[in-house]
Structures are given as structure tokens and as C-alpha cells.
Image (tube, grey):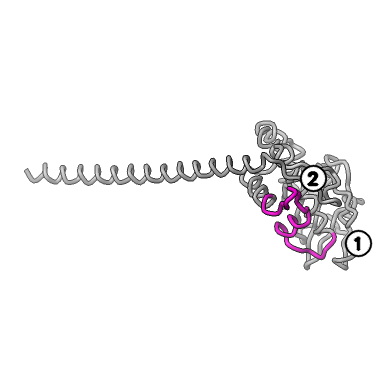
Amino acid sequence: MFKKFLLKSLVKFKARERVYLGSKSSLENNDMYFIWAKDSKKYYLESIEGENVLTFHYPDPDSDDAETHKIPFSQLSQYDLLIKHHYRLWQLEYTTLLSAYIYNVLGINRVKWFFEQSRDKKTISYYEKFELLSVVLKHRDASNKVNFYALKREIYGNSSENRTDYTHNMDLRWKLLALQESGDVSFKDEVLHLSNITVNPQALNTLSAYQREERKHRDSIRMARIQQTIAFLLFISAVINVYFTHIADKGT
């Protein structure tokens, strides 16, 4: 069965089948996990058993007590699929087994990252990085310290679900790593527990440089639009001129 082949290939590619998503999550870098949804319930991949996909789900959203649930391969089409792949600070998402297989097992993502090494090192987009830096600077105190949880509340809001809360912790920590790599902030791996993010002096210079680049970018876009408008008007003027010249020539 094609779906079974794809799922087995993806599980083998990622080495680990089960990723525990509770409050003591085992989510690690380069993990891929699979979520099948039906009737507002989410089922996470446990393993593959014969012609069935063994999953687990949480009846109580605020509890880490899970129950098992078997889904025959023949019934997978009745569920909505979401595949999440964490790679460094990226969180890639796929909605089909085939797309995840093509991009990962066949190596399209590795080729993409090879040709985008500078972007890969930043890990998050240029715009998102400096948006995050703006929020970090907003929350720094007199000693240039930032509370991790204050950042998380502003960016993600509040959540009572342990699994969602932990995923937000990891996602924000990975994004902060991009600022640490560029020297704008510094923290230890215990950031999730100690909230010891330090804003370095160069952070303001980095943000100012970004804002200057943004202004230049906006100005260049504005100038390009003006030039396009002028070119269009000149074209229309030339067409009208040719038309009336042609009419005048016919009249004579």
C-alpha cells in the first residue's frame, strides 16, 4: 500500500516514532511528528502495526494521560493529516505523506538548505528576526534582562494546555537562538526555567540598522512604483500620439 510505504519511509527517516508531547516533552531538534484529526480529536503517531497505524490521544486536554487508538490504513483518508517537522528554528508543516516524503526523504529540503546557507544560519526570516528583537527590547528591564515568559505571553498569548504551552516554549527558545547567534542577546539552555535572557549593547544598533534598511527598501519600492507609473504614462502618451498622427496623416 502506497500510504504505508510513505509513512514507514518517513518514520525510518526520522529514526524515532513517538514524540511525547506532554509537559515533560521529548521533542528534539529535527523531529517529525504526525497528527491525524477527526471530529475535533487529535491522534498522534505511536507506531505502525501491520495494516494499522497505532496512535495515542488525550481525552482531557489539560492532562497528560493518553489513550491508544488504532487507525486502519484503509481509513486514513477519513482523517485530516498534519505533519510537523522541527529543524533548528524551522517548523515545517505538511498536509500529505507524499509532500513530506518528497521534501525530506528525497532530499529537496537538504538541497534547498544547501543553497540557502546564510538564510539557514539565521533560521528565521529577516523580518521575523527583527520583529522578535523589537519585542525583546520592549520587555527589557533596567538591568537589560528580559523575562522569557513575558515574551511568550505577548507573542503566543496564554494557553492552559500543557502540550501547546511546551511547544510554544521550544518554538520561542529556538527563535531566540537566532538572536544569540548574531550576538544581540545571550542566555543559557536553562532559559526556559530561569528566564535569564540578557540584551547585549549591540541590540539597539542591530535594530537601528534594520530600520534603516527597511526605510531604504520602502523608498526603493516607492521609487520603483513611481518609475513604473511614469513609464506607463509615457507609453500611453506615445500610443495616443501615434494614433492621432495616423489620423492626421489619413486626413491629409
Q: Is residue 24 left or right of residue 242?
A: right
Residue 82 sits in which quadrant? bottom right
Image x and y of residue 44, in percent:
85, 56
The disc at residue 27 is none
| Mark 2 lies on residue | 6
Q: Is residue 249 above or below residue 84?
A: above
Q: Is residue 219 left or right of residue 121?
A: left
Which element is circle 1 on?
loop
Q: Is residue 158 magenta?
A: yes
Image x and y of residue 195, in percent:
81, 51
Which element is circle 2 on?
helix
- Name the foreground residue: 184 vs 140: 140
Q: Amino acid at mark 1?
A: Asp
Image x and y of residue 118, in percent:
66, 33
Q: At x 22% / y 46%, what residue is drawn?
A: 240
The disc at residue 64 is 1
Q: Which quadrant, please, contains the C terminus? A: top left
Q: Is residue 175 above or below residue 112?
A: below
Magenta part of the protein: which range?
A: 137-162
Image x and y of residue 158, in percent:
76, 63
Q: At x 71% / y 37%, what residue is drawn?
A: 183
Residue 232 sits in which quadrant? top left
- Name the foreground residue: 45 vs 49: 45
Q: Is residue 59 magenta?
A: no
Mark 1 or mark 2: name the one nearer the start of the chain.
2
Q: CA distance from mark 1 to mark 2?
A: 29 Å
Characterize the local packing of mark 2: few (<14), some (14-19) or many (20 or more) Cα atoms within 10 angstroms: some
- Name the foreground residue: 108 vs 167: 167
